Amino acid sequence: MELQEEPTAGAWGEWNPTEDSARPPRGKHRVAKQRGGLARSSTVLGVGVIAAVGAGGIATAQDRPQVAISMPSLPDFGMGGGDDGQRHAEAAGPAAGGGASAGSTGIIAQQAAQHTDAGATLVGRILQQAESQETAAEARIRAQAEREAQEAAAAEAKAKRETAQKEVEDARLAAEKAAKEAQEAADAKAEQERIAKLSGSYSLPTSAYTLTSHYGDAGSMWSSGHHTGLDFAAPTGTPAKAVAAGKITSAGWSGAYGYRIVLELEDGTEIWYCHLSSMSVTSGSVGAGDTIGRVGATGNVTGPHLHLEVRKGGSTVDPLAWLESKGLNV
């Protein structure tokens, strides 16, 4: 080992490590102690410089010249180094080579293994995350498909319900229409049967007639301002007949009505026969079609006719409608 010259006071100032501050290094590069002098080993010098810099000398070393420091060659840990690393390995001998090989095999391999494990873990996490994302995407697609299927099924069910409801409503309307038509037919048939039955119980008030004035006609010829009966114009002496079974309650002269007969039916309806030329029955009961008088021109008239009035509860009603309701074809 080559010793360097003793440093002199220079840019760094005088530096004289003592025995206490410069302890001999352990290992094979041990330097002999120098009494009252400076160790000329480059290792000691390097340690001293490093200690001085570590003690704060670096703060004042910016403007001073640098001191050459020789550093021991380090083994090549597989990080490069070229020929220098090879020469160092050869100089250090088998022990150094063995140490470097062991260090490279232990530390670098361990670090490489750690890096490999970390990389594998990262790759696994990335793959796991990608798989999770793919699974989530597939779940969303399935959920969307299920929603669309549910919506389609709901729409189809709604359409079927609406169709069924329409069919039910159409059937209901058809049934109501059929029932209404059947009821109308039944009512018409019942009315026909009633009229047919009544036709044998009712009779026209006269024959060989012509209808001249109808109920409700207006004019000054009538004291009320309108006609209150139905006029059957016929030759004088034409028979006047009872329209239904009843009893004669009044017969005689009645002013503008001339000779008048009042026939009261079983239901209380009154039939007035007016302007008669003669009265055949003046009291008692009569049957439908019985002759109770003769057509004439007495009272306030312009010619021979039968003035027929129908009264219910003291009020007049249309004689034509009443006769037709009894099944008579006037």
Image: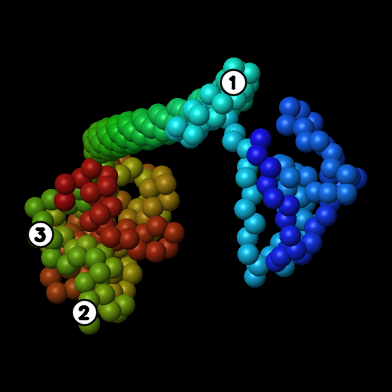
Q: Pointer 2 and pointer 1: residues touching (CB < 8 Å)?
A: no
Residue 117 vs 181, above or below: the answer is: above
Residue identified by numbered label 2: 219
Residue 35 vs 29, above or below: the answer is: below
3 or 2: mark nearer the eye: 2
For image coordinates 22% across by 62% down, the residue present is 230
* Quadrant position of the N terminus in the picture: top right
Q: Residue 70 in the image: state x and y as whole percent.
A: 62, 45
Query: CA–CA distance between discs 3 and 2?
Result: 20 Å
Mark 1 residue crowding within 10 angstroms, few (<14) / some (14–19) / many (20+): few
Q: Which element is circle 1 on?
A: helix
Q: Residue 18 in the image: state x and y as whole percent.
A: 88, 49
Q: Which element is circle 3 on?
A: strand
2 or 1: mark nearer the eye: 1
Question: Which amino acid is tagged 3?
Answer: Thr
Question: Which amino acid is tagged 2?
Answer: Gly
Q: Which residue is at the front of the view, 96 or 28?
A: 28
Q: Is residue 242 visible?
A: yes
Q: Earlier in the sequence, mark 3 or mark 2?
A: 3
Q: Point out the residue furthest to the bottom here.
A: 220
Drawn side of residue 213 relative to residue 265, left or right: left
Q: Which element is circle 2 on?
A: loop
Residue identified by numbered label 3: 210
Q: Earlier in the sequence, mark 2 or mark 1?
A: 1
Q: Is residue 114 visible?
A: no
For image coordinates 14% across by 57% down, the residue present is 237
Q: Hey, which quadrant is residue 55 in on the image? A: bottom right
Mark 2 residue crowding within 10 angstroms, few (<14) / some (14–19) / many (20+): few
Drawn side of residue 12 relative to residue 288, left or right: right
Query: CA–CA distance between discs 1 and 3?
Result: 163 Å
Residue identified by numbered label 1: 93
